[in-house]
Amino acid sequence: MSSFFLHPGIAWAALGLISIPIIIHLIHRRRFRKMDWAAMEFLLEALKKNRRRIRLEQLILLLVRIAIMALLGLFLARPVLSDRGLEWIAGALRSEDKILLLDDSFSTSRRDSEKSAFQREIDALGLQIRKLADRGGGDRLTVLRGSRHKTPLVRGVFVDAERALQLAQTTSRLVPSDTRLPLAEALQSIIETSARENSGSSRPRAISILTDLRAIDWQSPQGAADEALHQALRQLASSEESPTRILVLDCGRDAADNVAITAVSVEGGRPVAEIPADVRVEVHNFGTTVARGLGLRLRYAIAPANLQAERTATSLGPPIDELGPGRSASVTIPCTFRSVGWYGVTAELTGARDGLPGDDNLSLAVEVVAATEVLLVSGEPSSEPFEGETDFLAAALSPPGEVASGVKPNVVLEDALGREDLSRYSMVYVANVHSLPAETVAPLTHYVREGGTLVLFLGDQSDAALWNRQLGASPGRPADAAADGGGLLPARLGSLREAEEPWGFVPEVDAPCFRPLRDAKDLIAMVRFQKAFELEPLPGAQVLARLSDGAPLLVERSAGRGRVIVCASTADLEWNDWPRNPSYLMTFQEITSMAGRARAETAQPVAGRPVRVPVDVSTYALQARLQGPNYPSEPETTITAAPAPPEEAPDAKAGGFRFEIRDTDRAGLYALGLRSQSGVEEWRQIAVRRDPLESSVERVSAARIAELYPDVPITVVKDAGAFSDVGRGGFEISDVLLVLFGAFLLVEALLARLFAHHARAAAAPSLRAAAPGAATIAQGGHT
Amino acid sequence: MASYERFYDPKVLARVGRLELRAQMVVEGIITGMHRSPYRGQSVEFVDHRAYTPGDDPRHIDWKVLGRSDRLVLKRFEEETNLRGHILLDSSESMRYSSREAKRDQDTFTKFDYSGTLAASIAYLLQRQHDGVGLVLFDSEVRGRVPVSTHPGVLVRLGELMNSVAPSGKTGLGAVLAGIAESLPRRGLICLISDLFAPIAEISAGLEAFAVRRHDVLVFHVLDEAEVSFPFEGNILFHGLEGYPEIVADPRFLREAYLEALNRYLAEVEKVCSSFGIHYLRTHTGEPLDAAVITVLSARQRTRRRVSPGSARRLGGGAGA
């Protein structure tokens, strides 16, 4: 950085200013009074003697005056000097606050030919600290990590050799986290701490961000400017009390390749023990080159998974021969969970030779159940086999035989419905019930809204009007299921119809539940319906299947997080022969598994954000053991459940207890060991993942940053050496100039007086000389 | 300032155009002042009296004076007068210098004006004492001459000569003074009025010429006020008189050295004078003229006593006893 003037025009004018004393001097010499003079001899003598001294004195005065003009001009032109080489002046003149933000997001662990970006950041940090220690001065240093921006490593400290050594040791132990860089929030923290600490005093400030310049950190996913970041940047840059410079050190390198596992999920909801489950793994190529020879495998063990080295099972997946840039591949790997309980499943990608191996694995926490429980409410039971209303349904869901379906149907009568704990069931089937008992409507509605699936079969006992009133939307009630106790029905029940010619079965083949039937057209053609209710689908409802005359047969609508399906006909052979058709089994198994998936699907927690696990404190103790992803190399800790504050989950039960795991910087499998009241230890598995965006290799250029945030001056530097020298960039020496200007004025005045003074000090010769013979009046002969 | 002092205040005198009048003012002022001045009681005499010395004829004691002031004085008679006063007035160009510029409320008063006034005053004084007085104007040579005379009209002739000459020419003090000394037949009182801007050697030679002939010499060194104090400021082109070159200088830077040079020269002049036993009085154009004139009076006194010891007996009476 070179020196320059803030007002270059004035700098040129300053040259003109310098000439003023010279011109005055020259003019002065030409202007004189003319005078006759008799005592020339003495004057000549004086002149000869003093010519040199006079010249010197006049020259000195002239130079001083030129200097005064020059200083004035310089002061007005406001020069900015680079502090390279003048650090001691810079430090003495104006110290500033140096705030270094260290990007320890996951992407910085990417290793290029020599080092990882994070390592480069640490090196640059070390260089800057050493420079500060060498320079001395009044600069204060604050260092904070992106993942822990509220708790800086050091805050506002003066750096001497000892402090520098301490810092070097601390920073050498740092490793990148699995989180993103919360740039806007980190900058906001900086603003808040500065506001707290600096009240009153104005210190200039340099904020240096050591980062790998990922596009995701600097712009929104759509590629536009991030509003929160823009706000924070603007606030920093325009602060009046603390003039701020923003610097970015680019420690990343342009990367061409990265392949990562982006998602892992279990198909079909919660897997059932001993039943093979399909685990789907999605792989994405973020890079610009083709990835070849990739392999996938799964490792899984029961919770606490990190401790189960011997009991870890492995399933290999099919290889991925080629994955083009920007493309994804989805691979299904079968695995069988032997026990009931929580499992930790980790998908691993092999053969990806990019610099970022961290995202080549992804963990998932899976709850394995004994079976998927389904509630069947039968309106017309019978002891005769397949005479009961739900017999066929039960058989369809859990066919007898060697291979277990994993579904456990539980049949109850409608009056027993009120006693059931609906949260156990992934689905509730209600078949040919006259009407729902009044006290069951609310729990059922809650069950559906919380993600449950309700399937209603009609029949000869169904009171359509009652159903409409109980569960349907009617005038005066809102059309959706928002209001309690009503609006669950996806369609209005009309009158019963009987076919002259039995109707055929026309499913919507695009509907997900009919996926298995895509290649079973001939099966479907055999189904015949004799009787069915009229259905008027309500707004928002979807018709899943129709009768051959076009009338809706199966209508579905979501309510809250769950959904309701109504079938216009019976679940048994009363009004149709569908139960005899294999498509009956396939359809309802599919619907059941979809339901299971819906309930099991909750968002996977992301590293950096706290994880909350609700707990029923009547069943479990308040304290639980917590093992992190690095267990056993990191020791386990104990956490205590606390009541959830009302703002956390508005529709959760107020005062419900939960465990909060705050430190989730590391991605991976966490195990929570709960102790039940009976003393039995139960382990829950929690899988914290990295933000998938961190795998993106796309970088952002300095030009793009300038485009996105044009009103904020941000300097992007690539060279760590230059970066450390970018201390305060330039510093103004106006203060010094002003002081010098005043000093020179004083000097000029003093010199002028001095030179003139000793001229005046010479005394005029006495006027009356005494000569022998008496100048005074002689006394002569006085008597 | 007492009213009589105004008579010899140069500023006042400058306003008076006529030289004779000026001279009169000076002298009368002095005389008036003497009644009230510290000079009183001392042995300055003027025309009518001289102090009584033992051996004098007591018959000529002025008893009125004794009664009035307890002083023994003798009435003097005209025959006593035999003093010859020669006023040598420098009229070279350097005497033309005046630091006082002609302004509305002041007139220029050059060294020559001052010197002339002094000369005229001295002449008036001597004339009043019935002494003989003459004048020589010179620069590098004699410019004009009024022969010594006791005639009252000599004053007029003095005045005319002085008024007719405008100072010019170079100062010559060696040869011209020697020439003048040679031309004087008898010893007398020499009043040299000059700014003495000449080499010391010349001054010395000139004065020696008089000392050798046993004249009584009074040197009145007249300088301009500004020449003595050098008060100038600002850039000045000094135009040298008597052929000296021009100089442009800032006088503030030169003052100290100038005064040093001047002082050295003045000291040398004094030395020369004292080596010849010559009375030296230095004055400048801002100073009142009384001291100078009074010097003449006392010198006259000395001269008379020395010149004719025998004539002391002749004094005091008309007829020989």
Image: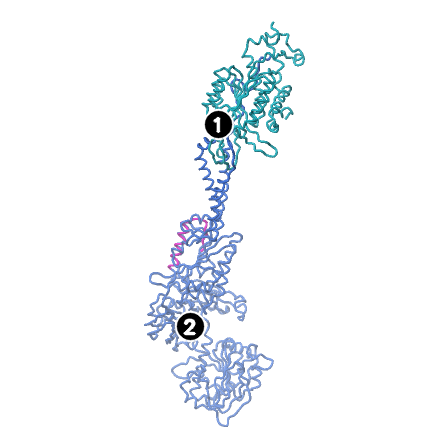
Chain colours: A blue, B cyan
Q: Chain of mark 2?
A: A
Say which quadrant the N terminus of chain B sits in.
top right
Q: Position of residue A323 (x, y in %)?
A: 35, 73
Q: Is residue B138 above or below residue A168?
A: above
Predominant secondary structure in magenta?
A: helix
Say which quadrant the C terminus of chain B sits in.
top right
- Whole-Å distance between the Cαs marked 2 and 1? 130 Å
Crowding near pointer 1: few (<14 within 10 Å), some, many (20+)?
many
Q: Position of residue B112 (x, y in %)?
A: 55, 27
Please state which amino acid type lies under the numbered disc 1: Lys
Crowding near pointer 2: few (<14 within 10 Å), some, many (20+)?
many
Mark number displayed over residue B316: none
Pair 2/1: label in front: 1
Of A80 and B14, nearer the camera is: B14
- In the rendered structure, the answer to whether residue A726 lies left or right of residue B21 reads left
What secondary structure is found at the residue carrying circle 1? loop
Of A176 and A39, nearer the camera is: A39
Q: Position of residue B14 (x, y in %)?
A: 60, 28
For disc 2, the marked residue is A366
| Residue A608 can be seen, yes or no | yes
Mark number displayed over residue B170: 1
Query: Which residue range is magenta in the image?
Result: A119-142
What secondary structure is found at the residue carrying circle 2? strand
Please state which amino acid type lies under the numbered disc 2: Val
Q: Is residue A679 above or below residue A156?
A: below
